[in-house]
Amino acid sequence: MKKRNWILVAGIIGIVAVAAYTTRSSWMGSNASAQGPQRPRMVSVELAKAERKSVPVDVDANGTVTPISSVALKSRLETTILSVHFQDGAKVNEGDLLFTLDARQIDAQIEQAEGVLAKDRAQLEGALRDVRRFSELIGKGATTQVNLDNAKTTADILAGTIKSDQASLDNLKVQKSYTTIRAPFSGRISVANVKVGNFVRPADTAPLAVINQMAPVYVTFAVPQRVLVDLRESMAKGVSGVTATIPGHQRSETGKVAMVENTVDATTGMVTVRGIMSNENETLWPGTLVATRLTIRSEDAIVVPTVAVQRSQTGNFVFVVKDGTAKVQPVTVDRTSQGMSVISEGLAGDESVVVDGQLLLSDGTRVEPRTKKAGA
């Protein structure tokens, strides 16, 4: 009897369990309806706008800073240095006194030449008096024409001697001027290779010091020959420009094209260009290697950040986002400039393109824009 009761209880429990399972949708209806249908996958991306704006047509190259004027100071006399009037590496102005050389020997020679000149002038005065006296006497018949002619000849000889004396004196004064060495132009002077007491001469190979002009300066670099025609046209219009930046620093100098070499290097296909920079703050130092940018002209074009352009076997493309959906848009990239790509075909401007998150995208993927991180 008991065994039958247990079988009956177990049957009832089984029936209750089956009924509960079949009616689960009614007593779990609130939670199931809260979940609703599964949403499609959304990819978070960063967007940027395709813009139409003026973009420079430029060429990047490595260049070297060279001074417009550079002079190696040397002695034109065999003498001794008495004074050095500058500090090594100092900035000097045109006309500043740099070196004083021993001039005592030349001073003595100048005094000697002045004495000879004074003597010859005195002799000339005596010869001129003789000419005047003989001229008076020959009118009275008291002397001969020969005496008058001889007096005139002597006076002419002495006049020529005085000119020679004056020239010798002037030459000595020029030699005396070489005993003071002054800056021929403003710039930076190097270390003085000789100090006070050193004997110097014109045959010395090492200069006393070197002065380099610092403002303005040249920046010399090479560009491909394919840009030569456009560059010459822009130079004629006065729209070309050059920017030189020291690698690792943000400071730069801007200027214009000063000249283009008259020959293209046949081995490299490059032509040398020289830009002139004002360099008033002495940002550029002679001999420095700099990164140069030659701006040929500016033109209106559609640009997008270079990071937005993706590459595939069929060519370049970007992901254009419209109505929350990413679409693959093939594009043609003309060139890149300062982190931007110039698009010649494929975009009309004002489109939203993906610049971060492309790896998770395919044609038709749903996307949602995210805020660009500060400082990115």
Image (cartoon, grey):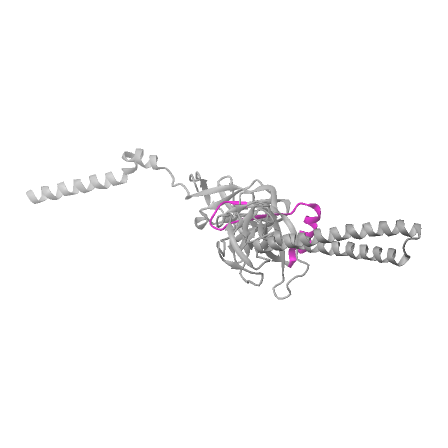
Q: For the point 9% across and 44% down, which residue is it?
A: 4
Report the residue that reaches farthest toward the front: 142
Q: Is residue 243 magenta?
A: yes
- Specify start and end residues of the magenta stretch as a single range: 225-252
Q: In this view of the protein, which residue sits in the foreground, 73 or 364?
A: 73
Report the residue that reaches farthest toward the bottom: 267
Q: In this view of the protein, which residue sits in the foreground, 10 or 339?
A: 339
Q: Locate residue 281, reporting x and y percent.
A: 53, 43
Q: For the point 70% across and 46% down, which residue is it?
A: 237
Q: For the point 69% across and 52% down, which residue is it?
A: 232
User: Left or right: where does residue 14 sit relative to residue 266?
Assistant: left
Q: Is residue 331 visible?
A: no
Q: Locate residue 121, reporting x and y percent.
A: 74, 51
Report the residue that reaches farthest toward the left: 1
Quadrant location of the N terminus?
A: top left
User: Left or right: where does residue 143 sit relative to residue 165?
Assistant: right
User: Left or right: where does residue 130 sit relative to residue 313?
Assistant: right
Q: Quadrant of residue 64?
A: bottom right
Q: Is residue 8 magenta?
A: no
Q: Locate residue 358, reporting x and y percent.
A: 46, 48
Q: Is residue 315 above or below residue 282?
A: below
Q: Is residue 79 visible?
A: yes
Quadrant location of the C terminus?
A: top left
Q: Locate residue 14, reporting x and y percent.
A: 19, 42
